Amino acid sequence: FGVKQVHFLGFTVDGDGISIPDDRVDIITKVPRPQTLYELQRFLGMVNFYRDFLPNIASCLSKMTSLLGKDCKRKSKKKIVWTDEAIKFFDDCKQSLQNATTLANPKLHAQIVLLTDASNTAVGASLNQRIGSQLAPLSFFSKSLTGPERNYSTYDRELLAIYKAVKHYQHELRGRKVIVMCDHKPLIRGFKADSTFMTPRQVRHFNYISQFVDQIEYVSGDSNEAADCLSRVEVGMIDCKTASWDFVHMAAEQLIDDDIQKAVSGIVSTSLILEEKVIDSGKASLIGDVSLGHFRPVVPFSMRDMIMECYHCLAHAGVKPTTDLIRSRFVWPKMKKEIRNYVRS
């Protein structure tokens, strides 16, 4: 207790975040080139342990793993035939460790931004939190593509990158405000589009993604900075497949909802921090709560069943996942009890 830095289970934890200890980096980078398949397996295991710190490491590891072959036995003493390409990827793995990123300490109410990308051989992603105007990395993910996946179109590979990243980070994303950023513009339209002209696989991927992601935004391939999206009201899930949120209509319903008006006027005490956000080019004002650090519209009684139906039907999740999903986007009095009763019915 009372120390600024702790070495714990192979990691260094301090006020800046989590990093790989220097002595671990030195040990791995000084490992000589493996001569047998068993030695290569040990090296790959050491690198793979720190894969969360290494962007795009899957490309290097997949090339190295190919040296093992399909029928590699445990502790095999079979000699490795090193090619110039294999030596290059071995050196690249070591270089990646030397350039490993320090992962930020998570902040509970920070905006979550998932950056994704795909190549012909692998998909990758970085999980980030927005601190002011900067993105701080929380983790990196990459995975090699299978033979059939490498035959996908660019559109499907980029969609697959988002799907695999969301599936990998589902526990970190659940109940949070999540934005995905990618460098493939057609996916932005696809996320909002009707599923009529989609393939069954695309429908499955978009339906799964929409359980966790609020919106998909475009970011140029050579840019690491995302556009500032905090100044606008965000629609909970852009395409819920069962309803689309008309915030102008919600604002009108708020005006005739007795509970909301009593809370705004102070007749009824509330722990919420209520603010008004101008929408529809100044023609309407939406009442919302900012106590969690972001704007959540207060849902009038007339629209609650529609919202619960939409988010529960996305995956027929249980009480807690459905509550977390809705609570991160909307708020109303006694919502936990109402959602619990709705899900159990």
Image (tube, grey):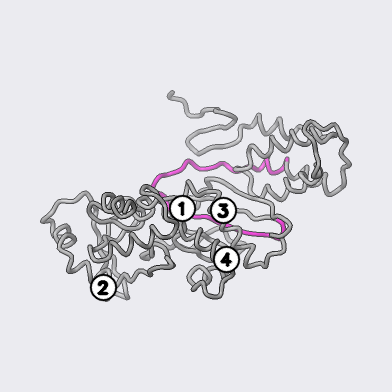
Q: Cα distance, mark 3 to mark 4?
A: 15 Å
Residue 341's mark?
A: none
Name the secondary structure under disc 1: strand
Which region of the structure is painted magenta? 94-121
Residue 74, position in %: x, y?
Answer: 77, 33
Write down the residue under mark 3: 165
Q: Nearer the viewer, residue 82 or 343?
A: 343
The mark closer to the camera, 4 or 2, is: 4
Taking depth in this image into account, of 330 and 50 the one nearest to the observer is: 330
Label 3 near label 1: C-beta < 8 Å?
A: no
- Identity, as a three-letter code, of the amino acid under mark 3: Ala
Q: Residue at x 27, y 61 (%)?
A: 299
Q: Residue at x 38, y 52 (%)?
A: 322
Q: Residues within 10 Å of mark 3 (few under 14, many from 20)?
A: many
Disc 1 marks which residue?
112
In the rendering, at what x and y percent does residue 286 appear?
27, 66
Q: Nearer the viewer, mark 2 or mark 3?
A: 3
Q: Which mark is residue 202?
A: 4
Q: Amino acid at mark 2?
A: Ala
Is disc 1 surrounded by few (<14), some (14 to 19) or many (20+) residues within 10 Å?
Answer: many
Question: x%, y% of residue 242?
Answer: 40, 68
Q: Is residue 256 left or right of residue 129?
A: left
N-term-proximal mark, 4 vs 1? 1
Query: Are discs 2 and 1 less than 8 Å apart at CB?
Result: no
Q: Gap in Å between the C-alphas at discs 4 and 1?
A: 24 Å
Q: Rounded to the nearest whole Å, what is the CA distance between mark 4 and mark 2? A: 36 Å
Whether residue 120 appears in magenta in the rendering, the answer is yes
Quarter of the image for the C terminus: give it.
bottom left
Q: Residue furthest left?
A: 267
Label 4 element class: helix
Residue that mark 2 sits on: 284
